């Protein structure tokens, strides 16, 4: 059962998330609703539970983990299907271990904003309905205040949910879980010759495509442990995440990740490794190691095809030609050498005009080595001419896939600091901006600017 918090208050709510469960965001600030989504009042039909799971953390087997601060209230049938509602930070559970079962305002705001920002970007993700807070003190690196974020997803089952029963040698529980997931979320697989093998292949494919989406917007998860991997291929558990600013393929967004296991470049192979861990967990049901290996092999092609599709769209290319890979590789090398801002580069690239190189200044100014950019841009223009690209049409298409606004860490930090002083307007304002990431939004250009110098000193870790 959730543990009540004293004097809970409303922080913010997401209207798009609320619509998914048939609610009106305007109603969520009511004190009775705040009480429910803080854990102070449990609805009559709710049967709260916490789930057990295990997992590999930073590549090492960590044993039993579980929902140490997350409590599932139940599920709701919404206009687009069933959604589970989960309170994160609602108190201790049987799996809290040495923890207090609480979340803090800082981390709750980060998860709330990023869940909804990712959804607006079209990336598979869990959702966040609302955030509530309390002045109850919580000790992390410093003294902070408690908060609860209400998360939503069709399911919160993880790779580690299967690993738990596999490593405990509980084949019947493993089968029960797999049968439930197939029946509830993958009914089309039930008729496959080996439904468990089909499940592994489909989850592997979804995971690869999800990570292709991450890479295409410069998103870094920060802690891709197997217990943080969704069986539905959703982005799950927002902790030390980050969006790429100065481009560096080896960038590590998680200060805790000293070895760089979850760097931007490593997200692709780590996703594959995590699918291997899932395959190992399902092997007692699949009963065919070679078939499981073949199912895992879909990862490389699924990732490559999805990323290639996304990259062509980001570059405004309607066709695929032989030298496209070289053009893209040269682009990323140039971005790396000049530490070009990832989001601004692709957004401004959409404004490039075929016959007006002199108009490239805002894009060109992102590069220290401007002659090198000019050389690449000449090749890019030649490639565009090969398919008779039209500036206005291409600009419209590119701006529809290259966001102007992403949740930069410094934007989140500004909103958090104001919220910690009792001002939640910036959280709500930033949420509104992030809900329309591809729109120009006159008056909000400051949210799309290069980060200030002080932002380079921001660090996020597993406690974030």
Image (cartoon, grey):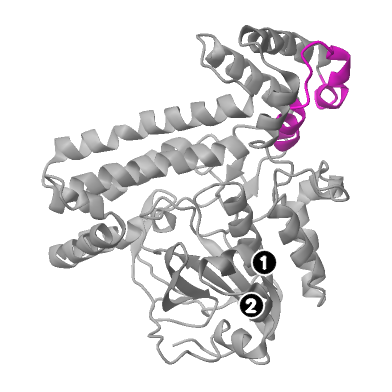
**For residue 147, which numbered disc appears in the image?**
2
Q: Nearer the viewer, residue 300 or 81?
A: 81
Q: Is residue 12 left or right of residue 281?
A: right
Whether label 1 touches label 2, CB < 8 Å: yes
Tell me which label, 1 or 2, sits earlier in the chain: 1
Q: Is residue 346 above or below residue 233?
A: above
What is the quadrant of the N terminus in the image? Answer: bottom left
Q: Residue 153: x percent and y percent?
A: 45, 64
Q: Is residue 198 above or below residue 354?
A: below
For the residue labelled by badge 1, is the local secondary structure a helix, a strand or a loop?
helix
For label 1, count other residues whose C-alpha is less than 10 Å away and answer few (under 14), some (14-19) or many (20+): many
- From this viewpoint, is residue 302 visible? yes
Q: Residue 12: x percent and y percent?
A: 69, 72
Q: Residue 101: x percent and y percent?
A: 51, 79
Picture residue at 22% right of the left edge, 49% below the top = 189
Is 361 magenta? The answer is: yes
């Amino acid at each position: 059962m959730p543990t009540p918090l004293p004097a809970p208050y409303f922080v913010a709510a997401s209207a798009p998330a609320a619509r998914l469960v048939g609610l009106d965001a305007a109603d969520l600030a009511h004190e009775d609703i705040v009480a429910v989504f803080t854990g102070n009042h449990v609805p009559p039909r709710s049967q709260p539970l916490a789930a057990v799971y295990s997992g590999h953390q930073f590549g090492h087997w960590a044993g039993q983990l579980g929902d140490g601060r997350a409590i599932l209230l139940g599920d709701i049938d919404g206009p687009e299907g069933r959604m589970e509602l989960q309170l994160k930070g609602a108190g201790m559970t049987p799996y809290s271990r040495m923890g207090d079962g609480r979340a803090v305002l800082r981390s709750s705001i980060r998860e709330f904003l990023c869940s909804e920002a990712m959804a607006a970007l079209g990336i598979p993700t869990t959702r966040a309905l609302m955030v509530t807070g309390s002045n109850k003190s919580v000790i992390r690196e410093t003294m902070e205040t408690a908060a609860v974020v209400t998360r939503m997803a069709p399911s919160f089952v993880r790779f580690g949910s299967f690993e738990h029963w596999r490593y405990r040698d509980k084949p019947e529980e493993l089968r029960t879980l797999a049968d439930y997931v197939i029946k509830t979320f993958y009914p089309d697989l039930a008729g496959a010759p080996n439904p468990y093998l089909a499940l592994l292949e489909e989850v592997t494919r979804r995971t690869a495509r999800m990570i292709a989406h991450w890479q295409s917007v410069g998103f870094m998860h920060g802690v891709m442990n197997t217990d943080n991997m969704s069986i539905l291929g959703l982005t799950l558990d927002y902790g030390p995440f980050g969006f790429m600013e100065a481009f560096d393929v080896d960038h590590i967004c998680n200060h805790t990740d000293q070895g760089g296991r979850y760097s931007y470049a490593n997200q692709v192979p780590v996703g594959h490794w995590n699918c291997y861990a899932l395959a190992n967990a399902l092997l007692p049901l699949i009963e065919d190691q070679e078939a499981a290996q073949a199912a895992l092999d879909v990862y490389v092609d699924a990732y490559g095809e999805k990323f290639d599709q996304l990259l062509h769209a980001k570059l405004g290319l309607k066709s695929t030609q032989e030298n496209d890979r070289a053009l893209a590789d040269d682009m990323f090398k140039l971005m790396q050498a000049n530490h070009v801002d990832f989001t601004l580069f692709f957004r401004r690239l959409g404004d490039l005009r075929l016959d007006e190189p002199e108009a490239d200044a805002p894009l060109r100014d992102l590069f220290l080595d401007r002659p090198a950019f000019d050389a690449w841009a000449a090749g890019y223009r030649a490639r565009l001419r090969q398919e008779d690209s039209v500036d206005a049409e291409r600009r419209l298409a590119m701006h529809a896939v290259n966001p102007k606004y992403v949740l930069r860490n410094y934007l989140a930090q500004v909103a958090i600091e104001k919220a910690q002083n009792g001002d939640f307007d910036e959280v709500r304002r930033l949420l509104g901006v992030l809900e329309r990431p591809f729109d120009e939004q006159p008056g909000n250009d400051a949210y799309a600017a290069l980060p200030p110098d002080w932002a380079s000193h921001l660090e996020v870790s597993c406690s974030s």
